[in-house]
Amino acid sequence: QVQLVQSGAEVKKPGSSVKVSCKPSRGTFNNHVINWVRQAPGQGLEWVGGTTPSGSANYAQKFQGRVTITADKSTNTAYMELSSLTSDDTAIYYCAKETKVGTGFYYGLDVWGHGTAVTVSS
Amino acid sequence: EIVLTQSPATLSLSPGERATLSCRASQSVSTYLAWYQQKPGQPPRLLIYNASFRASGIPTRFSGSGSGADFTLTISSLEPEDFAVYYCQQLTNWPRTFTFGPGTRVEIK
């Protein structure tokens, strides 16, 4: 099965930005929907945002104005950029793929990346 | 914004016992609900999609049920590898957004 390969761990200063990448181990993303989910240390899962079947992006209200999710078809890579970082953004960031998107049916996030640890510290 | 509540927060059971996990939505999500299992140091793994369909490779001891606002994940007979944290997640279509529940930890009694 295809895997999602994410970029390496990052250490950032408060107020800076981080850009995390996600690429399939083989094949292309095609029209697959890519979502980004984060998990702070010892905490639960939190949806950050994701692309839509039409190719646009939606974001959790909490991150509106601070996050940008893009996909570069030429490099077959998805990106999540988060700006104005604070210590509360310290977390593991996962990309997760919806291999199938159906009308009236939810197929779930069936393939996950290994996660990228982002640490925000002065 | 739809809020998901999971209960109990922690479930202490022995191998071989039946586990029943609940997920309740603040409003109807139809069947746009999935369940995930997460073990320490690993990404989540999809177990159930569209409320009651087992994902590829998931053992038959895992089953999901429910629709609207009340959902249940049942593990019919716990295996040692099933002790983990379980999350429910819903999809809202307009706009296309997701929400996760806070999780239920299934621990060995």
Image: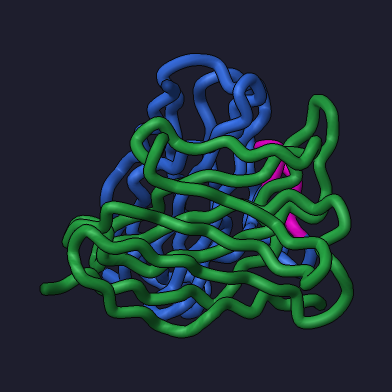
Chain colours: A green, B blue
User: Can you say which quadrant of the picture contains the C terminus of chain A?
Assistant: bottom left
Instruction: Report which quarter residue B77 is drawn in.
Output: bottom right
Residue in the foreground of this view, choosing between B59 and A20: A20
B12 vs A104, left or right, is left
Q: Position of residue A17 (x, y in %)?
A: 35, 62
Q: Is residue A94 left or right of residue A55?
A: left
Relative to A51, is A34 above or below? below
Quarter of the view holding residue A78: bottom right
Rendering coords of residue B26 (x, y %): 41, 19
In the rendered image, residue A112 lying in the magenta stretch gets the answer no
Number of disc labels: 0
Q: Position of residue A58 (x, y in %)?
A: 58, 36
Range of magenta residues: B49-55
The residue under the point 50% across, 78% down is: B81
Q: Name the side, left or right, on which B57 lies relative to B78.
A: right
What percent of the width, then of the height, locates residue A30?
87, 58
